[in-house]
Image: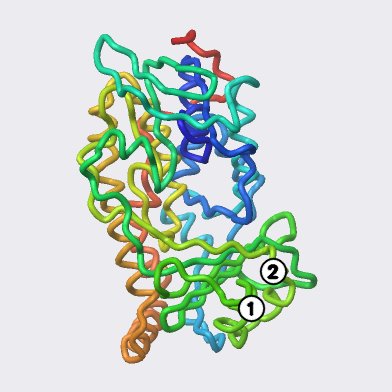
């Protein structure tokens, strides 16, 4: 695996449980993610069931529970029901810190499988009868399968498809914090304004995960610091936004421009190399499906590890559709037109009154996905190293 994020680690765990000898090469000095939580929907939790991790993650996660969508003044546009979502999609929507998921995935691997501070370059994608080759500072490695899990700026993707235009700017930037907020007691919610959104969600460990997004030119930075920028943009929004900002230190705030792959790749494999996650299909976070789709990729890849064209056939149409829907949602929740936002909010309020099931329909075909094989126990004995 080139890349030790969620997609790479899930692929490593799934392949290891299928009997492969795996090595994860991560250029960072640590696997510990910083400053963000991840929302896992029923589709990825069922994928994690395949490697015996689904129930453990469900138990560790902060349950999203009831919540909804609000305006900056605090008016509820719609209310969501955890029970309705679980009934419709066959499982809960849960939230946990990324570090928790990374820790549990790493625990499924042999102690020597993960190498940090290990930058790697794809030297040869290989073909039938010839292994793929990866160059590292410690020498060259040969592999029957290389998994490119190196993110939105994937060097593996560029090596496989040099003519592809790569990611484009999605038109907005994001801020994220995970912090303790004394006395915090509120329902999970997302708030849509004009060209701005805010989300606040409690975690099971007592901390709060908050994120914000705003339409802004690429490459921008606050003239002073990012906490001050958040105060300027969101400081007068409804409770608990001011309380979260008051509890936030300048160093707690992460800011990243959002990019996505607008033109789908011709395939998610070439030779003996397969791409997973953002390396294959980076998408805006507006559906909360980036990490979920990476987990799906990993499980499907392990299922089709001896037939990479079948992996592409299974994943490319689905992830392309999900990515396009995420782009459409970004245009809706980050629209800047004053008239457009009034029409949007009125329609959402009417839709909510018609019943929560109508609002959940946007996740039909996404959250109800199931893996290609039945779950098997994480204690399964591998069939032997490959």
- In the image, residue 124 sits, relative to residue 359, either above or below, namely above
Q: Residues within 10 Å of mark 1 (few under 14, many from 20)?
A: some
Q: Residues within 10 Å of mark 2 (few under 14, many from 20)?
A: few
Cα separation, mark 1 vs mark 2, equals 8 Å
- In the image, residue 58 sits, relative to residue 83, either above or below, namely above
Numbered disc total: 2
Counting from the top left corner in percent of width and height, residue 235 is at: 62, 84
For this rendering, which residue is in front, 9 or 138? 138
Quarter occupied by residue 236: bottom right
Which quarter shows the C terminus?
top left
Q: Which residue is mark 1?
A: 228
| Disc 1 secondary structure class | helix
Counting from the top left corner in percent of width and height, residue 184 is at: 74, 72
Counting from the top left corner in percent of width and height, residue 265 is at: 24, 43
| Disc 2 secondary structure class | helix
Q: Which residue is mark 2?
A: 250
At horizontal 38% and vertical 27% (from top left) the residue drawn is 122
- In the image, residue 280 sits, relative to residue 115, either above or below, namely below
At horizontal 55% and vertical 53% (from top left) the residue drawn is 38
Report if the CB atoms under discs 1 and 2 are less than 8 Å apart: yes
């Amino acid at each position: 695996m080139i890349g030790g994020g969620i997609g790479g680690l899930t692929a490593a765990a799934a392949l290891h449980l299928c009997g492969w000898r795996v090595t994860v090469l991560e250029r960072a000095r640590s696997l510990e993610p910083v400053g963000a939580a991840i929302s896992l929907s029923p589709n990825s939790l069922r994928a994690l069931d395949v490697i015996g991790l689904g129930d453990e993650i469900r138990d560790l996660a902060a349950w999203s529970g009831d919540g909804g969508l609000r305006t900056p003044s605090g008016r509820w546009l719609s209310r969501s029901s955890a029970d309705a979502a679980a009934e419709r999609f066959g499982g809960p929507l849960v939230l946990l810190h990324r570090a928790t998921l990374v820790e549990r995935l790493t625990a499924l691997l042999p102690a020597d499988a993960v190498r940090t501070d290990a930058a790697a370059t794809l030297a040869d994608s290989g073909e039938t009868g010839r292994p793929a080759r990866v160059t590292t500072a410690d020498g060259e490695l040969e592999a029957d399968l290389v998994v490119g899990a190196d993110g939105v700026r994937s060097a593996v993707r560029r090596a496989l498809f040099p003519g592809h235009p790569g990611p484009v700017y999605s038109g907005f930037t994001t801020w994220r914090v995970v912090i303790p907020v004394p006395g915090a007691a509120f329902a999970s919610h997302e708030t849509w304004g004009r060209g701005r959104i805010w989300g606040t969600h409690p975690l099971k460990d007592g901390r709060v995960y908050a994120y914000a997004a705003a339409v802004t030119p690429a490459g921008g930075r606050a003239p002073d610091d990012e906490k001050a920028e958040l105060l300027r943009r969101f400081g007068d929004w409804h409770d608990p936004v001011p309380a979260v900002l008051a509890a936030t230190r300048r160093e707690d705030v992460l800011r990243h421009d959002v990019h996505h792959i607008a033109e789908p790749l011709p395939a998610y494999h070439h030779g003996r190399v397969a791409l997973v996650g953002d390396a294959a299909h980076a998408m805006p976070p507006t559906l909360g499906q980036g990490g979920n789709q990476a987990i799906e990729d990993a499980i499907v890849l392990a299922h089709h590890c001896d037939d990479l064209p079948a992996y592409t056939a299974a994943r490319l149409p689905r992830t392309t559709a999900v990515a396009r829907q995420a782009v459409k949602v970004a245009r809706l929740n980050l629209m800047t037109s004053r008239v457009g936002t009034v029409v949007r909010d009125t329609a959402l309020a009417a839709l909510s009154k018609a019943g929560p099931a109508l609002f959940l329909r946007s996740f039909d075909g996404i959250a109800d996905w199931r893996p290609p094989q039945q779950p098997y126990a994480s204690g399964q004995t591998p069939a032997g190293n490959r």
